[in-house]
Image: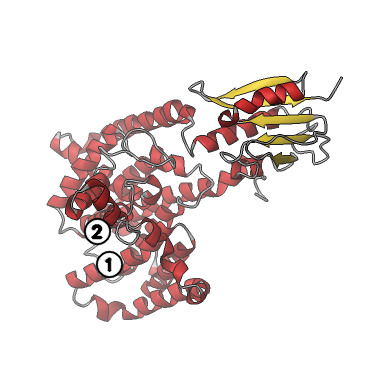
Amino acid sequence: MKLFGATVAGGRMLSVLIGTLTVLTTFYLARAVAGIRTGWIAAVVLAFSSYHIHYSRLASNQVADPLIGTLALWLLWEALAWDQDVIRPVSDHKHRFWQLEAGIGTAEALWGIAGMVTGLGWYAYFGARWVTALVVLTTLWRSLADRTLLRRHWRGMALFAAGWLVVTLPLLGWYAAHPSSLTERFSAVGVFASGWMEREHVLTGRSVASLFVQQLWRAVSAFHISRDPTFWYRPDRPLVDFVTGALVLLGMVEATIRVRWPSRGLVHLWYWSTVLVAWGLTENPPSSQRGLLLVPAVAMYAAWGIEHLLRLLALPRRVWPQAAAVILALIASLNAAFYFGVYTPREVYGNPSAQTATRLAAYMRAHPEPICQSGRDPACTGQVYFLGPPWLYWKFGSLAFLLRDFPGVDVAQGELPITVTPPARFVVVPERAEQMADVRTLWPGGVEVELRGPDDRLLAWVYDWPGAP
């Protein structure tokens, strides 16, 4: 905010930068494991994904999950490929990012940097912590395929552990003093640890196996059938458009046929393990805020789906770039039209309280009089009396940030201000509608405005009282 201002745009800018960088790291990862064509297609699919665009516009930290994941896996893959080309696409040898002869890095350095990046994930959203396990699982999988890997890379693995420890040590010190905070989040949302499974078994009479199968179904169908039940995104459709969804299915089939290819094995391991941990084992799947780590993997599946479709259509190789461009243009237009033309105008992000707060803040910043001469002027002469509790409070996050220069006070439920200093602005939520008549009666002669949502639902009354004539 020092750079971009203490505004909505400034608050969101870090997420914008992180989301943009994720497009780049997805390109490098996809190119490293599957070739430059897959890299370009996956990057474009991710760049126009409405799911990813949405979280790249929020002042929240979930969007760091895919950046940490793609960067860590890319560094790991480059380190593993340093002394063997079996896991690097044959057509992509010349695109190796790290050049030994240029002195940019070595396999050991890549391992160490990957450890530091993975450690940073522990300071982001909880989903980024899974990247540590994902790197370990990938290393174990490759060591089973290559029995000499541990012997060749043990120094790099030691540096990985050292890099991870250097970054996470302050956090580990906190957990040593407050051990419950390490697992409290999973204990709150895990289907077994939170007691959710047992409660649902008692309430519904269904078996634990049946409930778990339902969990898994909602998790694995998130990008094709199931819908986000939370207010974090809630697009009222699957998490990708129908064209991308079809291509993802085709790409999954192609990746399963070629599962012995390291690139396909990596994405399968990444996708299915994360689906299980992020959604299958947590309440209320598919909660979109927990699934951001999956989006680059979905983009890579879609890229393979496009390539496989072009092979099935038996198109000449010379027209593949143009055909792929047409498909990507269709995906881009569908996502842009949906997100900016359909989803955003609904104003469903957050919850009803957040919608009211955002609309109220926008109105007050545009109409600061008679309370303030300017929304950024701390020398306000009036007072805002907020009849919102217990449904909405003056210190609600959006109001506290956007209206930080406006003087305001909460008025408890069933009460009215004892003394009112003009000029005054009363804000009344619909849940306290019966008190609006009292406000009009006790402080007559004011100007009343109704704030409504895009569905014409009443959000709040704003009543400006300049004072007794």
The front one of 370 and 51 is 370
Q: Which residue, as the protein is rendered here, is positioned at the far right? A: 469
Residue for badge 2: 269
Q: Residue at x 45, y 57 (%)?
A: 125
Is 63 situated above or below 373? below
Q: Earlier in the sequence, mark 1 or mark 2?
A: 1
The front one of 396 and 208 is 208
Q: Residue 17 appears at what percent x and percent y?
A: 52, 48
Q: Is residue 15 left or right of residue 270?
A: right
Q: Residue at x 45, y 40 (%)?
A: 54
Q: Amino acid at mark 2?
A: Leu
Residue 209 showing in the rendered view: yes
Q: Amino acid at mark 1?
A: Leu
Asked whether the residues under the numbered discs 1 and 2 touch, taking CB atoms below 8 Å apart as contact, a structural biologist would say yes
Residue 128 showing in the rendered view: no
Q: Is residue 304 left or right of residue 237?
A: left
Q: Residue at x 19, y 37 (%)?
A: 310
Q: Quadrant of residue 395?
A: top right
The front one of 448 and 37 is 448
Q: Residue 45 appears at what percent x and percent y?
A: 35, 40
How many marks are shown on the rendered structure?
Answer: 2
Residue for badge 1: 137
Q: Which residue, as the protein is rendered here, is positioned at the far front? A: 414
Q: Residue 319 appears at what percent x and percent y?
A: 24, 34
Is 338 situated above or below 110? above
Q: Quadrant of residue 265?
A: bottom left
**What crowding class fits label 1: few (fewer than 14 Cα within 10 Å), some (14-19), or many (20 or more)?**
some
Q: Quadrant of the C terminus?
A: top right
Q: Residue at x 85, y 23 (%)?
A: 468
